[in-house]
Image (cartoon, grey):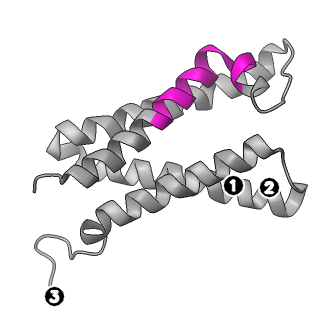
Amino acid sequence: MELTRFEKIALGLSGLTALAIGASILFAPHGFYASYGIALGDNPNLLSELRAPGAGLATFGILMLLGIRRGRLLSVSLAVALTVFVAFPAGRLVGLVFDGLPSGSVIAALAVEIAIAALLIAAFRRRLWAPAPGAAQ
């Protein structure tokens, strides 16, 4: 099944967002986290612990983008996109409960993540709730 323009936009926006954020964390963690008011210092252990998931997020962004062009990867791309953009805000909401209110820039990131998750769900709602091919109905 061909992707609609809305589906391409949703997957493209999610992929570009994940790729940009992941690459920023991977290659410029000090600058990325400074935008949230977080000073990292020069602890190589901390920087390694931040760069590793940054690389994962960038890779997930690439997978999301590949789903636009390669139909066989669409289900993987969609699963990755929904996982990232549902898990990140879920983790931030847990942080709100246990740690209190973060800075405005972190709240803005939460709002963007929720918006992208909602966009993905709206764009792919037909595919998400359709019976699997060959499944008994």
Label 1 to label 3, Cα distance in Å?
Answer: 36 Å
Q: Is residue 27 magenta?
A: yes
What amino acid type is highlighted by mark number 1?
Gly
Q: Secondary structure at mark 2?
A: helix
The mark nearer the N terminus, 1 or 3, is: 1
What amino acid type is highlighted by mark number 3?
Gln
Q: Nearer the viewer, mark 1 or mark 3?
A: 1
Q: Which residues are magenta?
A: 17-32
Q: Residue at x 36, y 65 (%)?
A: 122
The mark nearer the N terminus, 3 or 2, is: 2
Q: Is residue 97 above or below residue 42?
A: below
Residue 90 appears left or right of 105: left
Label 1 to label 2, Cα distance in Å?
Answer: 6 Å
Q: Nearer the viewer, residue 119 or 82?
A: 119
Residue 9 appears left or right of 116: left
Q: Residue at x 80, y 55 (%)?
A: 95
What amino acid type is highlighted by mark number 2?
Gly
Q: Nearer the viewer, residue 78 or 112?
A: 112
Residue 120, image quadrant: bottom left
Residue carrying label 2: 95
Residue carrying label 1: 91
Q: Is residue 105 above or below residue 62?
A: below
Q: Is residue 121 above or below residue 107?
A: below
Q: Secondary structure at mark 3?
A: loop
Residue 98 x/y as whole percent: 87, 60
Residue 48, image quadrant: top right
Q: Residue at x 52, y 52 (%)?
A: 85
Dominant secondary structure of the magenta stretch?
helix
Residue 24 x/y as whole percent: 59, 22
Label 3 to label 2, Cα distance in Å?
Answer: 41 Å
